[in-house]
Image: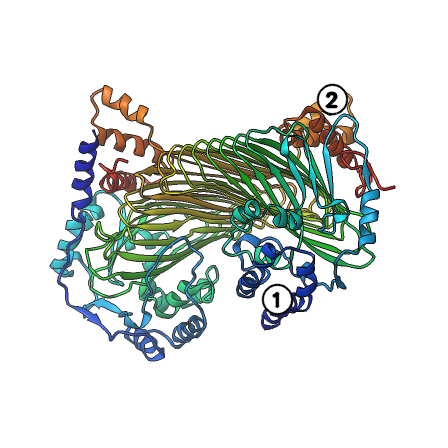
Amino acid sequence: MENDQERLLNEVTSGDYKYGFHTDIETDTIARGLNEDVIALISAKKGEPEWMLEYRLKAFRIWLKMKMPAWAHLKIPEINYQDIIYYAAPRQSAKLSSLDEVDPELIDTFNKLGIPLEEQKRLSGVAVDAVMDSISVKTTFKDALADQGIIFCSFSEAVREHPDLIKKYMGSVVPSGDNFFAALNSAVFSDGSFCYIPAGVRCPMELSTYFRINAANTGQFERTLIVAEEDSYVSYLEGCTAPKRDENQLHAAIVEIVAEKGSEVKYSTVQNWYPGDKNGKGGIYNFVTKRGICKGDNSRISWTQVETGSAVTWKYPSCILKGNNSSGEFYSVAVTNNHQQADTGTKMIHIGKNTKSTIVSKGISAGFSQNSYRGLVKVLKGAENARNFSQCDSLLLGDKCGAHTFPYLEVDNRSAIVEHEATTSRIGEDQIFYCNQRGISTEDAIGLIVNGYAREVLNKLPMEFAVEAQKLLQITLEGSVG
Amino acid sequence: MESKVNRSAEINERFVDLFQTSRGRIERNSSKLINSFRSSAMDRFRELGVPGKKNEAYRYTNLEPWFGSNYKSFFVPEPEDFGAAEDFRCEVETLDTHTLILLNGYFPTSNGGIIELPDGVKVGSLARASEIFPEIVESHYGKYAVDGTDGLIPLNTALASDGIYVYVPAGITCSKPIQIINLVEATEDIMVHHRNLIVVEEQASVDLIVCDHALSPRKFLTNAVTEVYVGPSARFDILRVQNEHNSAGKITHTFIHQERDSIAGSNNITLHGGLVRNSTYHRLNGEGAEANAYGLYLADKWQHVDNFVNIDHAVPNCTSKQLFKGVLDDFATGAFNGRIYVSQDAQNTRAYQSNNSILLTDDAHMDTKPQLEIYADDVKCSHGATVGQLDEEALFYLRSRGISAVEARLMLMFGFAHEVIASIKTAALRDRIDNLVLQRLRGELSRCATCMINCDNK
């Protein structure tokens, strides 16, 4: 049994990163380093208006005065921010009108990744805005969406074509000086997605963007902004896979969601950046600021995430529950293996009356990894009848890994009911024995148990993602029996 | 921002000055062994300072108004002060205890400093004990009170000159609980640093009751450190009852070091106090050890109660349990910061933690931070925290049976608090505390008018 487990563990952990390939596409990069000239250059390359450059420079000046946060339960080697290329775009001269005009090698990359761009267009009804190294290559289904007045385009396009909306909403949820990584992103963000759902519109399809880091030594700094007007609905999917690379790559993204009165936004993520090899070498550093505001009454924001990748994950998708009767949800599965480190969780800020928040976090640690949940539930004085329920469970697979829980509950209103519960345990030997007895191998049993353990969260994912997420869980964990 | 930094630097500087100017007086009242720790402790304090809000462990407690205040004199007792302390007697009805009094952090030395109880149990002044039993004190003093970030511990080591010493020899079960009454009384605002050492040898057993009282209506600040050694298969329980007034600041640090198969319990019952901060550390250093940390806090007016607990599972096969409950009224604020730390090889650990608070008014505030830090896989750990209000349905149930609203609320609060009290093993003591809490909830208990053992100051 012990040997079996060893062997399985080795098999899985020595297996190469499934999505670790590198596509040779000519990329347009600029020199390493960060200063006001570089920012001006990025802004110029993207043909941005003056006000956008001003916004970037302001953020940069704030960033210069900030220090990298050290409070997370993470050990991060010092990052030299002057040794990073802040802009890389696949070289593309003319705008493309059909898939045929897309670089065939690029299409090939997507196919290897299992993103059937053309198929999806025809069959699945998922609009894919494929972001490859910071520039949107192709947006599909745009016309179908435009009919309903929905704007779904790359961020740079939105800056050019919808400046009023960008000016109004950009930085309204995550101000440029919010934190070190948000300031960095605000200064150098490369591209991202913009999504606007007009009042009363229910977005007819799941919107999805696949992010991919491709060129070597480039940080990717996306920015996503989702605005849902009154009584609208949208479900947004974000998935990440990144090719294998030896040096650590920096990833600092911002996602902002504005939910007006009666609207609902569902944001789902499957994150599978390259986690580094089994000795902890390489891997992506993932520092993400995600925040949504339930601005109007009866609005609702739901975050669902499956985190399996990245060497370091620093990510706290949050909800500001400002409108009365608004609700926020956070469902998370975070899996760490080998030398991965994750410090993830959420913040629920209750401001409006009758606001409700639900937190379900499932952490799974294996190998030498460290997996932490860090969350804040804050009930402000005026938040009458606020209700929160948090559940944070950790599963340990191996005796060299760690699972930690750091919840913060700050309650300033007596009518609030705030509950937090957490458990930490390992897979019971009796459970594995039970499966073995019925002819299920230990490896399959672990997969079964882990999937069952994470089911509560996986169920929240849209169909398209649920399948991929389950596969990811299996890839990351199978065989890592403690 | 800058002024804040300057302010805390100024406060720290004042303590450094205080140490330098009063060192002679402090050392005269203490022993050579204890004095030998002072210089390095002061160096450590210089590095750490009084914990500010940036210190994660003090995130919800602002010490500045307490440490920034001017305490007119650094108190060193005169012989006549002990006369007053000796007049202070406790009437014990159903509970029989050995009673010791600590006045402003000093043990009255007029009776020789050490009292011999039956079976070789010794209680008395720590300063005196370190002269008479240097080998015992030397092997324990300063060994357990270790916290990397808390500047108040080295500050205590540098400034404390005396405290209580309790020694229970191997195999002895101390039949009567030992009761320590901490009194602060002065005509001026004073600050007290005292240091206690409790040694419970192998297979010994003892109950300790600590009562904190402030007698005169001055501003007081206490910064106490208690080190406890619980030997193999020994049993130790500490019950702390805090009943001070709103101008009294009480900061206690209790370090309980547990060897194999030992059982140790700590219970902090906070009834009154302007600022109360109890830091309780259990270190499970031997296999099979069991730690139980309990706390109950009832706060109103502008009081602030902060309970910090750290259970360190250093070895396999240990069990721990934490239960902290509180009711916050008026403008009171509460904080709970509990941590379960399971080291890498501490397999087969069972650790549970729970914190429940009730807010009675819109101005009451509760911050809670239960934490799990786990590095071993074969563990069963859980924690839970709730903040809420009295159950409307339960209230309705009681009202529908003809119980008045006031009485119904009282019953529910008492029932809520009783779970902590129920952990007290001695029946007589449990009844006393029940009674005290009931009185406290009714608002009948003022200051230390009614101590648990009916003390009355003659």
The residue singled out by tag 2 in the image is B400
Residue B182's x, y, as percent? 73, 45
Residue B165's x, y, as percent? 64, 44
Q: Amino acid at mark 1?
A: Asn
> Dividing the image into 4 quarters, which one contains the C terminus of chain A?
top left
Q: Amino acid at mark 2?
A: Ser
- In this orientation, which residue lies closer to the viewer: A135 or A217? A217
- In this orientation, which residue lies closer to the viewer: B160 or A120? B160
Query: Are tags 1 and 2 found on a single chain?
Result: yes
The residue singled out by tag 1 in the image is B12
**Residue A346 shows which numbered tag?**
none
Q: Residue furthest right?
A: B458
> Dividing the image into 4 quarters, which one contains the N terminus of chain A?
top left
User: Residue A191 sits in which quadrant?
Assistant: bottom left
Tag count in the figure? 2
| SS state under label 2 | helix
User: Residue A415 sits in which quadrant?
Assistant: top right
Q: Chain under label 1?
A: B
Q: Is residue A66 left or right of residue A285?
A: right
| SS state under label 1 | helix
User: From this viewpoint, is residue B405 visible?
Assistant: yes
Q: Residue at x 61, y 68 (%)?
A: B4
Residue A103's x, y, as percent? 14, 61
Badge 1 density bin: few <14, some 14–19, many ≥20, Cα 10 Å = many
